Amino acid sequence: MRTLRTAAVIGALGLALSLSATPASASSVLSGRCSKGAYQLAASVTYGNAGGQHFFTKLTWNIIGDVGGNNDVYFEFWKNGSPDSLVKVFKMNNVSKRGSMNISLRRPSGDAIYVHGGAVFDTNRATDPVCKYFTRTI
């Protein structure tokens, strides 16, 4: 009888553990960098993977160089395929040199996603104040 009771307790514990939620993976970062003359953009996207999905949570940018406070920064999320397809665009107009934005974007883990982004720098010193970057694919 005692053996049956012990087996029942162990079985119940196993069931309780199997029903608990799967914890989300630790956050990772996709990053990109581009420059145009004396101006540079460093951008990053915070993401994780859980429950069969990629989830993107934060965009961050840092502009280096003598630029004003009215820069345009954009992040385009692309699905790698033949042809590639645009999933979502986040564009921030008239932003300062450094900033971040919380976002909520989910895609199936089977989608190979990369980020293409860039900036239009607030300056009249450059004839073409635009730079673009690509991240690796996840």
Image (cartoon, rainbow, N blue to C red):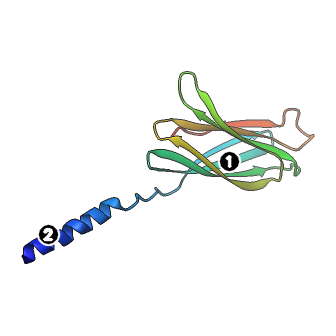
Task: Determine whether 65 is above or below 2 in the image.
Answer: above
Tell me the residue at 26%/68% (across/down): 13
Query: Which amino acid, by three-letter code, is at mark 2?
Result: Ala
Q: Quadrant of residue 6?
A: bottom left
Q: Which residue is denoted by mark 1 in the rendering? A: 43
Q: Nearer the viewer, residue 80 or 11?
A: 11
Residue where numbered disc 2 is placed:
7
Q: Secondary structure at mark 2?
A: helix
Q: Quick one: quadrant of the N terminus? A: bottom left
Residue 5 position in % (x across, y down): 13, 74
Residue at far top of view: 82
- Left or right: where does residue 89 sit relative to residue 106? right
- Of 1 and 51, which appears nearest the observer? 1
x and y percent of residue 132 in the render? 71, 36
Q: Amino acid at mark 1?
A: Ala
Could you tell me how far apart the alpha carbons at marks 2 and 1 are, in whole angstroms? 54 Å
Assess whether mark 1 and mark 2 are in contact (beta carbons under 8 angstroms). Answer: no
Looking at the image, residue 23 sits to the left or right of residue 81; the answer is: left
Say if 21 sits above or below 30 in the image: below
Q: Which residue occupies 75% across, 45% down?
A: 40
Give the number of callouts: 2
Q: Residue furthest right?
A: 124
**Residue 53 x, y percent position in the rendering:** 48, 45
Residue at 80%, 53% (x, y): give it: 97
- Identify the residue shown where x is 69% and y is 48%: 42
Q: Looking at the image, is mark 2 or mark 1 earlier in the sequence?
A: 2
| Label annotation for residue 113 | none
Does residue 96 appear left or right of residue 14 in this picture? right
Neighbourhood count class around disc 2 (C-alpha, 10 Å): few under 14, some 14–19, many 20 upward: few
Residue 66 image position (x, y, % from top left): 86, 50
